């Protein structure tokens, strides 16, 4: 026979699960918002020059190693 405390324990457990779920959803949305702010702050970069394809026995171009250099003193020359 269940005790009189069983409904209260069940209600408290359900409340804690719902509270934890709400906290996780809020935290997840906060992380996504932060990631979106960071991604939106990155400028689009377009290549001005491209190397000729280099074959080294691989199906892709072996010279495709992108590098981005940021000149913080003069961002226009990055």
Image (spheres, rainbow, N blue to C red):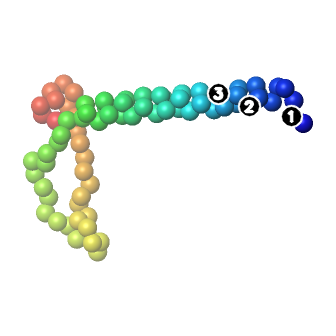
The disc placed on residue 53 is none
Query: Residue at (23%, 60%) from the top-left corner?
Result: 63
- Residue position for label 2: 10
Q: Is residue 6 above or below residue 64?
A: above
Which residue is outermost to the bottom?
A: 57
Category of crowding for the residue at label 1, using alpha-carbon neighbours closer than 10 angstroms: few (below 14), some (14–19), many (at least 20) = few
Q: Nearer the viewer, mark 2 or mark 1?
A: 1
| Corner quadrant of residue 34 | top left
Front residue of this view, candidates 52 and 1: 1
Query: How far from the left and from the top, in percent, is residue 68?
Result: 23, 42
Q: Along the horizontal axis of the image, is 46 left or right of 55?
A: left
Query: Which image quarter is the C terminus in?
Result: top left
Q: Residue at x 84, y 26 (%)?
A: 4
Q: Quadrant of residue 59?
A: bottom left
Q: What element carries label 3?
A: helix
Q: Which residue is drawn at 54% across and 27% down?
A: 23
Name above or below for residue 23 compared with residue 57: above
Query: Mark 2 or 3 closer to N-term?
Result: 2
Q: Which of 38 and 69 is in front in this view?
A: 38
Which residue is rendered at x = 90% and y = 36% of the image?
1
Residue 57 horizontal/vertical position (percent): 29, 74
Is label 2 in a helix, a strand or a loop? helix
**Residue designated by label 1:** 2
| CB atoms of marks 2 and 3 within 8 Å | no
The image's mark for residue 15 is 3
Q: Nearer the viewer, residue 6 or 55?
A: 6
Q: Nearer the viewer, mark 1 or mark 3?
A: 1
Measure the C-alpha gap from mark 1 to mark 3. Answer: 20 Å
Single out the residue that lies furthest toward the left.
48
Cα distance in 3D space between marks 2 and 3: 9 Å
Q: Residues within 10 Å of mark 3 (few under 14, many from 20)?
A: few
């Amino acid at each position: 026979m269940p005790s009189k405390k069983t409904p209260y324990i069940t209600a408290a457990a359900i409340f804690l699960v719902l509270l934890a779920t709400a906290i996780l959803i809020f935290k997840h949305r906060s992380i996504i918002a932060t990631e979106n702010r960071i991604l939106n702050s990155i400028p689009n970069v377009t290549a001005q020059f491209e190397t000729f394809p280099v074959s080294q026995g691989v199906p892709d171009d072996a010279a495709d190693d992108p590098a981005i250099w940021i000149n913080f003193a003069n961002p226009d020359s990055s």
